[in-house]
Image (cartoon, rainbow, N blue to C red):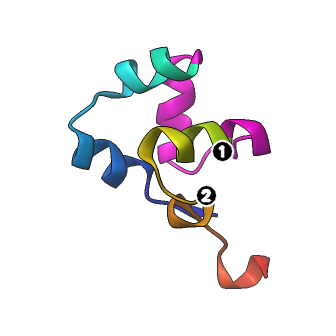
Amino acid sequence: MKNWLKVERAKMNITQAELAESLKVSRQTINSIELGKFIPSTVLSLRIAKIFNVKVEDIFILDEDEM
């Protein structure tokens, strides 16, 4: 799965630590999501989308082989 989390953070000019604090997760969790090493839960994905005021599918995209 690909994601645009880093891009969305840059648009809002917030750090991984600031995003992590607002989501009540660790900065390492945000880093792992951005690197594609960790796939967030549905609830966390929805919370992330809400913070950026976008749809979940605007941040997280399935690879072709995952379809």
| Quadrant of the frame with the N terminus | bottom right
Q: Which residue is denoted by mark 1 in the rendering?
A: 45
Question: Can residue 38 be seen by looking at this rendering?
Answer: no
* Residue drawn at point x = 70 percent, y = 41 percent: 40
Magenta run includes residue 35? yes
**Is disc 1 placed on a helix, strand or loop?**
helix
Residue 9 point in image, percent of width and height: 32, 42
Amino acid type at image mark 2: Val
Quarter holding residue 62: bottom right
In this rendering, position of residue 5 left or right of residue 63: left
Marks 1 and 2 sit apart, C-alpha to C-alpha, by 6 Å
Label 2's element?
helix
Q: Nearer the viewer, residue 14 or 16?
A: 14
Part of the protein shown in magenta: 24-44
- Asked if residue 36 lies left or right of residue 7, the reply is right
Q: Which mark is residue 56?
A: 2
Residue 3 x/y as whole percent: 51, 59
Residue found at x 42% / y 26%: 19
Label 1 CA crowd tier, 10 Å (few <14, some 14–19, many 20+) = some
Residue 59: mark: none
Tags 1 and 2 touching, CB below 8 Å: yes
First in sequence, mark 1 or 2: give its number: 1
The answer to which of 55 and 33 lies nearer the viewer is 55
